[in-house]
């Protein structure tokens, strides 16, 4: 039986499930993920099921719009585990049968039988961590797969019936040339995915790759070259029929985009195509989400919290029926408005005055009139009195724009 418990109006949320297991750590990774802990799988899945029950019973009346398995490497889980989590989210949070259910998968962990099982368990969208089509780059990144295995996994996913596949790629790698990057983008386009995410490598302190770089064993990525890589890939994707709907994300459009960075039809990202990530749109629009699992973050009813990060500690807490988190705090209005601007401006649709007023009861011009005028003078944002959005130039300098909105409510 589906439950909406606390008697308040039910809220639509995205549900994120964190799977903190990897076969081995990539050299650049600083996510909350662990190699060698897969023996905890059954206990961990039981803990997620308990957390979902406790949250739905004790805390909130949330109704799920989407479900997203992230990690880590969710594709390492047995089909029974995925099945049990999907079923729990349907039961406890009323996830509709037609909802988007994404699973992050690593090539090298997928077999045809596993892919069939994933389809059967209700996964509708795969996000494949391909990263590069060059063996030397994959080796440097410590990935567990080759380009050949990525292609094999992609084709097997098609045979299994997946019709919504996103490929994740990384650029600005140490030693990577513009030519190598274009080859990777071109080879991925030849596969015909519905969606692409392109992220510049961030060298997090303390990771093996950052240390190798500090020792001078690999060259530092050049920021100008990284900007060129981004621009060239944007052009290639535009020509191939993709709409850029977010700074790092592209979906194959129903109709060609009129420009590299175009306002979606009627100003709504959903109108670009059925392949935009509905779950990630929830984050960018700063709408509520619940995170289940070790270290997962949640944002609901103006509070933000995160769970205990280590899988075993998290399992112990759920066994003893404790929902207390690693951190929990209300979010101030200044933070809320600043983050809403920062996240919303990542989208090509930008933010409208109407939406901000609905969220905060204040008008865009009253909150940020001076900042908006200044950024518009520098041609970094466009503002027509109702909608504010990054210009094509502004999207290349997004971080400069975002910081103007943080903590600067007028
Ligand atoms: S697969 Fe992803 S989560 Fe796992 S170690 Fe590599 S980058 Fe980190």
Image (cartoon, rainbow, N blue to C red):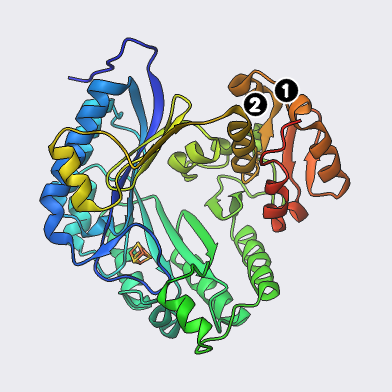
Vertical order, 352 against 7 (above or below): below
311 and 56: which is toward the camera: 311
Q: Position of residue 174 (x, y in %)?
A: 54, 80
To which quarter of the image does residue 383 belong?
top right
Q: Quadrant of residue 61?
A: top left
Q: Earlier in the sequence, mark 1 or mark 2?
A: 2
Q: Is residue 52 visible?
A: yes
**Residue that carries the numbered disc 1 in the rendered image:** 363
Looking at the image, which residue is at 50% across and 66% down?
Answer: 189
The response on whether ligand 1 sits within 8 Å of label 2 is: no
- Residue at (28%, 25%) from the top-left corner? 94
**Residue 84 visible in the displayed image:** no
Q: Are marks 1 and 2 in contact (CB under 8 Å)?
A: yes
Q: Which residue is under mark 2?
A: 356
In which quadrant of the rendered image does the N terminus lie?
top left
Camera-side residue of 280 and 364: 364
Q: Position of residue 51 (x, y in %)?
A: 22, 35
The answer to which quarter of the image holds residue 138 is bottom left
Position of the C terminus, as image quadrant, is: top right
Does ligand 1 reach within 8 Å of label 1's beta carbon? no
Q: Is residue 291 above or below residue 244?
A: above
Q: Is residue 218 left or right of residue 26?
A: right
* Drawn side of residue 313 relative to residue 382, left or right: left
Q: Ligand 1 falls in which quarter?
A: bottom left
* Residue at the farthest right position: 377
Q: CA distance from mark 1 to mark 2?
A: 7 Å
**Mark 2 residue element:** helix
């Amino acid at each position: 039986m589906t439950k909406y418990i606390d008697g308040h109006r039910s809220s639509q949320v995205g549900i994120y499930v964190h799977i903190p297991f990897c076969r081995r750590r990539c050299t650049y990774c600083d996510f909350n993920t662990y190699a060698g802990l897969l023996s905890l799988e059954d206990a961990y899945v039981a803990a997620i099921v308990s957390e979902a029950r406790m949250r739905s019973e004790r805390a909130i009346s949330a109704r799920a719009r989407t479900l997203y398995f992230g990690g880590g490497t969710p594709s390492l889980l047995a089909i029974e585990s995925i099945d049990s989590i999907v079923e729990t989210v349907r039961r406890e949070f009323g996830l509709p049968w037609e909802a988007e259910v994404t699973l992050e998968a690593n090539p090298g962990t997928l077999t045809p039988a596993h892919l069939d099982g994933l389809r059967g368990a209700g996964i509708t969208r795969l996000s494949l961590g391909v990263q590069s089509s060059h063996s030397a780059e994959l080796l440097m990144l410590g990935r567990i797969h080759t380009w050949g295995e990525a292609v094999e996994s992609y084709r097997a996913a098609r045979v299994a019936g997946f019709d919504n596949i996103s490929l994740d790629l990384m650029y600005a790698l140490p030693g990577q040339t513009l030519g190598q990057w274009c080859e990777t983008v071109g080879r991925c386009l030849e596969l015909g995915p519905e969606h692409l995410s392109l992220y510049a490598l961030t060298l997090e302190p303390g990771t093996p790759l950052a240390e190798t770089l500090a020792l001078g064993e690999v060259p530092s990525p050049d920021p100008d070259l990284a900007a060129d890589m981004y621009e060239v890939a944007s052009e290639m994707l535009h020509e191939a029929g993709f709409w850029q709907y977010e700074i790092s994300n592209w979906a194959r459009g129903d109709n060609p985009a009129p420009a590299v960075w175009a306002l979606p039809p009627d100003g709504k990202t959903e109108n670009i195509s059925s392949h935009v990530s509905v779950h990630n749109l929830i984050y960018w629009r700063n709408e509520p989400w619940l995170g289940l699992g070790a270290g997962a973050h949640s944002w609901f009813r103006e509070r933000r919290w995160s769970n205990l990060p280590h899988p075993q500690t998290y399992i112990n807490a759920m066994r003893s029926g404790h929902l207390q988190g690693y951190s929990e705090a209300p979010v101030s209005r200044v933070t809320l408005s600043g983050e809403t601007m920062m996240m919303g401006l990542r989208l090509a649709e930008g933010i409208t005055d109407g939406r901000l007023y609905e969220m905060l009861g204040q008008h865009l011009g009253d909150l940020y009139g001076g900042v908006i005028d200044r950024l518009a003078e520098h041609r970094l944002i466009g503002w027509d009195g109702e909608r504010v959005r990054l210009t094509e130039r502004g999207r290349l300098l997004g971080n400069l724009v975002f910081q103007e909105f943080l903590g600067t409510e007028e």
